[in-house]
Image (cartoon, helix red, strand yellow):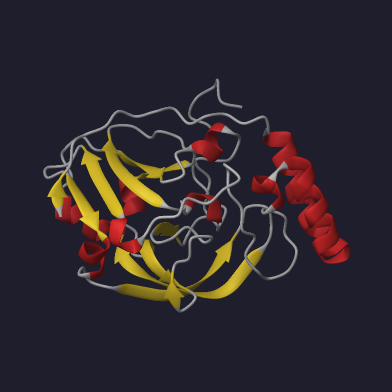
Amino acid sequence: MAPEEVTPFETPKRVNVGRRVFIGLAALGAVGVLVGNKVQSFLGNAVGSGLGGLLPFGDRFRIYSITGTFPKIKTSDYRLKVSGLVQRPMTFTMADLQAMPVTSFVKTFQCVTGWKVPDVHWEGVQLSHILDTVGVQPGAVALSFESYDHADSESLTIDQAHLPDVIVAYRMLGAPVTTEHGGPVRLYVAPMFGYKSLKWLSAIRVVNQVQPGFWEYNGYPVNGWLDGTTGPTNPDPNLT
């Protein structure tokens, strides 16, 4: 692992899909078993690969991408940069991550639009261990996550990041994380809806305020708890 420079925060881009469209797609979950894959394919073509992959038809993953493509990163080339309010900014390779204590568990993956995949095996390193390795400075409040697709982003508070079932995952479904599933390394936030589990994780920045990610800037709650815990759904009144 090597020292890493701090990079500035970039505001996530908006897309031409607002809260009403997401709510409409989520409502389709109630009739998903009736319409089947043909409707999913039609809607995927109509509104784009990103949304088509979110529709809740059956217990299987919906593969999607904001950009319409998947970034392909060789395992040997993978790097995770950790910077911001830390004592020791670092860049981790896959070998570095795999040398850390391993955490594994089986959890259900739940999408905010209604579909879920039960009994998914996950394996990786606890995010809290990475934070302990770099050392979090006083005044740190949250984490901002970036993706190799240069489009998606996410956020967690420091307390959320220290939950035991929040991991930087390099294995799922009994195998290395595939490109389509966000590999070679992705974030997995077990207690929250799937949009919080950023794919193709490239960077973590420790910051002094919550910086909403891509989906939050496009209408999703900042806190996506599966158990319905209330929290700030929109920290900026200009975000709709």
Instruction: List x then y, in percent, for residue 176.
Output: 41, 71
Q: Looking at the image, which is closer to me, 194 or 153?
A: 153
Residue name at image x 24 percent, y 58 percent: 93
Instruction: List x then y, in percent, for residue 178.
Output: 48, 65
Residue name at image x 40 percent, y 61 percent: 184
Residue at the far right in the pictured view? 34
Quadrant in which the C terminus is drawn: top right
In the figure, residue 145 lies in which quadrant? top left
Quadrant in which the N terminus is drawn: bottom left
Instruction: List x then y, in percent, for residue 144.
Output: 36, 40
Q: Looking at the image, which is closer to me, 108 or 181?
A: 181
Residue at the far top in the pictured view? 238
Tell me if I can see residue 233 in this picture.
no
Q: Left of 101 or right of it: where is 236?
A: right
In the figure, residue 24 lies in which quadrant? top right
Query: Is 65 situated above or below 140?
Result: below
Query: Is 136 situated above or below 211?
Result: below
